[in-house]
Amino acid sequence: VINAINEMEHPDKNIPRAIYSAVFIAVLIYVVIALGAILAIPFDEIIQSKEYALASGTENVLGHWGSDLIILGALLATSSAISGTLFGASRQIAIIASDGYFPRILATRVNKIPVIAIISMAILAFLLVLAGSLEVILEFGSITFLLVSLLMTYANYRIRDLTHSSTFVTILSFCGLLSGMTLILYYEFHNQPQQLVFIFSLYFLLTAGSWAYSKAKRAA
């Protein structure tokens, strides 16, 4: 939501409303689905089916219509996640490019939409899928989201007097994000260390490339 600050009217009012509304709706949906699954699906089946427990349980209750409904919901959720990622990350790339750390062409906007950044992100994602696997991309995305959110929370804490943010909420958010970051890194380190090496290698390449580009541009 905050990535659309330059594309909305009255962001000082609409951004807080959008954030709180989105969080409330997301929590409500997750709680309702979790309660429905627990009440309708036996625990043994949940443990046995694992990732597709909801689809399996819904099929037992509603027949093939239930599993089809879950598949449709999964497709919509995946599409929404991809759209949200492209929406937010492309605008961040455009801002970074306008600051001189990425090629200026990535900051090009058509009707306020960073078209070049979106296309570049799609190509990069395609290359990452070819270089690794879908699981690696998912883990990379999860860690990156946590890392970016953690840094943004820290930055917000530093300028909390300007943003009029609640110190308690900011610190609580920082601790929660830090805990999540620690847990996912711990899991990756003990279960799939090769993925962790691949992810940190990507971070190093992106950081080094950005630093080298900005340094070369300033020298020129």
Image: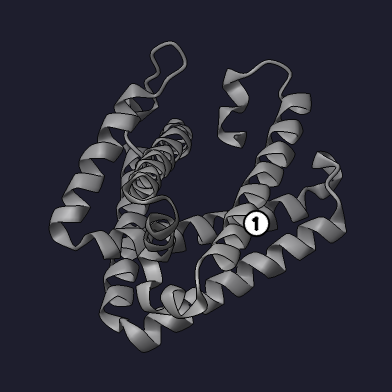
190, 77: nearer the viewer: 77
Residue 48 drawn above or below residue 110: below
Please state the horizontal and vertical placement of residue 208, each as a whole percent of the image: 32, 58
Image: 176 above or below 217:
below
Instruction: Name the residue located 43 percent from the left edge and 62 percent from the top edge.
Output: 57
Quadrant holding the C terminus: top left
Q: In the picture provided, is 4 more to the left or to the right than 217?
A: right
Q: Specify whether residue 17 is in view.
A: yes
Q: Quadrant for residue 10, please give it.
A: top right
- In the image, 146: left or right of 12? left
* Front position in the image: 54 or 95: 54
Q: Amino acid at mark 1?
A: Val
**Residue at x-position 37% and y-position 78%:** 48
Report the quarter where the N terminus lies: top right
Which residue carries the number 1 mark?
A: 31
Comparing 187 with 124, the one in front is: 187
| Residue at the outermost top position | 111
Q: Nearer the viewer, residue 176 or 164?
A: 176
Which colouring convention does the figure follow? one colour
